[in-house]
Image (cartoon, grey):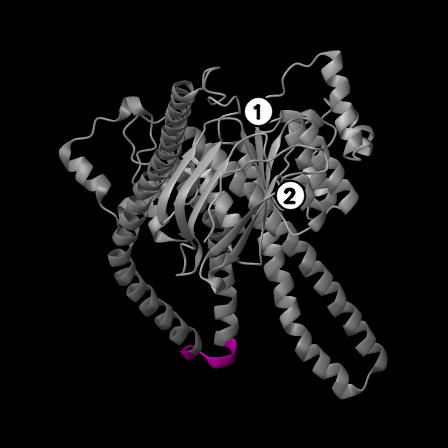
Amino acid sequence: MSSATYQRIASINVGPPRHVEASESSNDEMERLALDCLFVRRFRRLAGIVLSNIAAVLVMVVLLLLSVAYEVIVYQVGLTTSQFYVVLGKKHWWGFLNQTAFCLGLIALVACVKSGKQYVSSTVTVQWRQLLTKRLQELRNGIDNPDQRITQDVDRLCQVLSDIVPTLLISPFTIAYYSYQSFSVAGYIGPLAVFVYFIVSTLVSKLLITRVVPRVYELEKQEGRFSKLVDLSSGISTVAGNTHRISVLLERMEAINEEENLVEKIKQAKKPSSDDDSDTSGEAAPQFVLKNISYGSPYDDNMFAEGLTLELRPPKSVFVTGPSNSGKTSLLRILKGLWSPLSGSVTRKFGGSLFLPQVTWFGSGSLRSQLYYPYTPPKSTPHEEGEIWRLVELAELGHLLKRSGGLDSSLQPMWYESLSPGERQRLSFLRVLCQRPKMALLDEATSALDEDTQVKLYRECRKLGIATVTIGHHACLEPLHDATLELHGAAKGGTWTLKERDQIPNGDSAVIENAQS
């Protein structure tokens, strides 16, 4: 048994609290940790507690009987080898079979007795632990680390005691018997050598244990205190982490609210009056005005366009074309305000514009919420509801109404994952037709559609009075715009060409200010 366990449990006064009136000298005696008479007195007190219950005593007796039976059987097993030599020497077949059967019976008996011994030993451990824990619960306050003493120290003590007590009780008889057997074979030298060896080993062990036990006791005492610090630090770190995350969330939300308020103020300040929507000539005010701008890629020295002057005024439409990497998408980024030109000025009118990329994101929600994203869908009259259905059928997306269960059903979990590239572009174009901005800026927004569908959608835009600034390569779209801006790219020194169209299929005239280089 661990001496540290003995000393740690024994150092607790397990007597009733009303009898404890310790002086300073008695306190010093109680704090002394050693394998001496004090230890014996303490152990006797513990034995009185664990043997105070008749059931515990009976189970202990059963454990002793099983231990004795186990020793007897093991002794018989040790004799079987010599008995086999006798039978084999005589070449006695039936004797060999009888001896083998006897050995098998001993093995089975050893297994049963050993299992029963372990089971009863565990039962003794539980009973003793229950008795000691009950007594410890009656002690006064002031014990250091009571949770560790009750849950760990008592458990260790009871486990070790249940293992060694039966051995201690039957050891005198076992030692006497084997000493006699050794004396019969080797004379007095045999048992004397064994006793001397064990006495010397015990003295050396006691000398070492008395030095080690106090340190082990102090180590486990400090470990118990340290475990409390670890638990507290874990709780503090959790509080600190959650505080940080919640604080960051609050700061982000406050920043978002401030930005929303700022944007709303700017919109209100820049909101055009009815007189601002048209100039002196009666035409609509321009949405974008580019004056002598030069721009290129922010990642290299390529100059896409130099000295570009352009006025985008609804309902006039412009078709932007050119070779790959000529700055078409970059022009939309400048119009949107994502990039800044290297020189020149850009004037933007707040509101009335919708930017549509080639690949549009669709989240979850109803079909109506996808059409009016990122705004809240307005309440519609029956006439407006019928107009939405007409536009959906025009874009050949009537099957989505059946699939989703209507405009306001949320049966479709994620639109982006369930739509083909062509369906995504048609649905994104429907945003233009349903929201009806003054001007839509489209970055190859119909590249995945056939020519007939593209022409049909763009004609609907013209019918609804929506001006378009289209980046594309399909020649079928050019006649549906009032002018064509061709960017030659950095390979040709950033030159560009703006061609106006005096007459388009619907008979509308087009006048757009331009500059050429």
What number is the disc on residue 108? Answer: none
Please identify the quarter of the rendering in which residue 276 is found: top left
Residue at left 68%, top 38%?
Answer: 504
Kindly give the residue lying farthest to the left in the view shown: 24
Residue beneath label 2, please? 445
**Where, quadrant-wise, is the C terminus in this rendering?**
bottom left
> Magenta segment, which residues?
184-189
Please tell me which residue lies in front, 142 or 259: 259
Q: Could one spot residue 166 in this view of the protein?
A: no
- Across and down, in percent, residue 499 comes to 57, 47
Kindly give the residue lying farthest to the front in the view shown: 502
Q: For residue 472: magenta? A: no
Residue at left 40%, top 22%?
Answer: 270
Residue beneath label 1, please? 375
Q: Is residue 84 above or below residue 332?
A: below
Please identify the quarter of the rendering in which residue 292 is found: top left
